[in-house]
Structures are given as structure tokens and as C-alpha cells.
Amino acid sequence: MRLPRNISGDELAGLLAKFGYELTRQTGSHLRLTTNRHDEHHLTIPRHFPLKVGTLNGILGDVAAHFEMTKESLTKELFS
């Protein structure tokens, strides 16, 4: 599945709530999200619109690795 080209950092943070990520702090234009599912995990997401494809790809790869799933299955679950 192709990654979306028109998603903002705020929208991605909302979608990641499905996986238990919650906003823990904001510094400038960056959000810090944390989940305690499958042990503690932190993410930093820029509040840009749109997110660059490489940035989005990196964030999704990090989440997929934490939850021990493929990036493709994570992408389908988030964006379908």
C-alpha cells in the first residue's frame, strides 16, 4: 500500500491512538507520544503539513518494529 502524501503530524498522532500512543509533551512544533503496550515506546512526530514521505516512513517503521509487525500491515490498519 502506498503511503499517504497529505497527512499532517496531528492526524498521524490521532491515528496512532489505536495503538495506545498518547501525547506526553509538546516542544515547539514536535509532539512526543508514548505507549506502554508491549513495553514502553516513545515517538517524536513533527506537526508539519504534509509530513515528508521519508519522515512518515521512518515513524511507521519504528512503530511496526515495536509491535513486531510488518510496515505494510501497520499501514493497512492505520490508513484503510
Image (cartoon, rainbow, N blue to C red):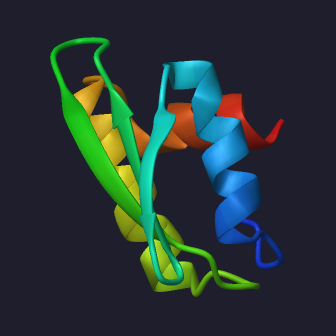
Q: Residue shown at 51%/22% (left/top)?
A: 19
Percent of width and height locating residue 73? 54, 31
Q: Residue shown at 71%/61% (left/top)?
A: 10
Image quarter in which the C terminus is found = top right
Q: Is residue 6 above or below residue 72?
A: below
Which image quadrant for residue 3? bottom right
Q: Which residue is at the front of the view, 19 or 28?
A: 28
The answer to whether residue 57 of the structure is visible from this angle is yes
User: Which residue reaches farthest left?
Assistant: 39
Q: Residue shown at 76%/56% (left/top)?
A: 11
Q: Which residue is at the front of the view, 62 or 32?
A: 32
The answer to whether residue 1 of the structure is visible from this angle is no
Taking the image as shown, residue 47 lies to the left or right of residue 40, namely: right
What is the total number of numbered labels drawn onto the structure image?
0
Taking the image as shown, residue 10 lies to the left or right of residue 64, namely: right
Taking the image as shown, residue 40 lies to the left or right of residue 15, namely: left
User: Which residue reaches farthest top?
Assistant: 38
Q: Is residue 33 above or below residue 17?
A: below
Q: Is residue 30 above or below residue 41?
A: below
Taking the image as shown, residue 36 lies to the left or right of residue 14, namely: left
Percent of width and height locating residue 56? 52, 69
Q: Residue shown at 61%/43% (left/top)?
A: 75
Q: Is residue 31 above or below residue 48?
A: above
Percent of width and height locating residue 29? 53, 82
